[in-house]
Image (cartoon, grey):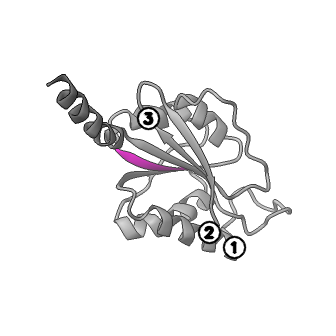
Amino acid sequence: MKRMLAMLALSLLPAVALAQPVAFVVRHAERADAGMATTKDPDLSDAGRARAQSLAAMLKDARITGIYVSEFKRTRQTADPLAALLKVEPAVIVEKDIAQLVARLKDAGNVLIVGHSNTVPAILKTLGVADPITVGDAEFDNLFIVTRGATPSLVRLRYR
């Protein structure tokens, strides 16, 4: 009987793991003014728009119920293809207000968060990721997957 209960408990572990909400955290895609920084709020470049499409293709089946972006166009444009596909209106959170973002995630399911090279590490830390993370100025291909819960876990992938 104990053996059968143990096997039943083990068979339920994947379902429990899947029940934990996940935050997909990315930096916005490539800026149109890369290297020149001629404006504070540039659009995405052609490469950036292609990367945003790739992100949408990757996450279309991830059961995302919320999308969070900063007040800058490049974060919104990075999220737009997925938002259109899922018919989810991105919520705008002021770039510097990470506490408000994390507060809104408390009861959220799976979410996409699009930030900046200087905010993604802070967002991950606030989500409970212990290891320090850096995102270089030329890095646009990081996809951080944080399983939220009592002990958050992090997977860092690269996408094109």
- Name the disc covering residue 62, or none: none
Label pair 3/1, CB-CB below 8 angstroms? no
Say if the magenta span includes residue 1. no
Residue 148 image label: 3
Q: Quadrant of residue 18?
A: top left
How would you rate the neighbour count of disc 2 (Cα within 10 Å): few for under 14, some for 14-19, many for 20 or more? many
Q: Which type of secondary structure does the marked residue at label 1 adopt?
A: helix
Q: Position of residue 65 (x, y in %)?
A: 34, 52
Q: Position of residue 131 (x, y in %)?
A: 66, 29
**Mark 1 Cα-neighbour bin, 10 Å: few <14, some 14–19, many ≥20:** some
Give the quarter of the figure containing the N terminus.
top left
Secondary structure mainly formed by the magenta segment: strand
User: Circle 1 sits on which residue?
Assistant: 47
SS under mark 2: helix
> Few, some or many C-alpha atoms within 10 Å of disc 3 (few <14, some 14-19, many ≥20)?
many
Is residue 112 inside the magenta stretch? Answer: yes
Residue at figure coordinates x 56%, y 65% from the top left: 77
- Screen quadrant of the C terminus: bottom right
Image: 73 above or below 96 = below
Question: Distance of mark 3 from mark 1, alpha carbons?
Answer: 31 Å
Q: Quadrant of residue 72?
A: bottom right
**Which residues lie in the magenta part?**
109-114
| Label 2 vs 3, first from the N-terminus | 2
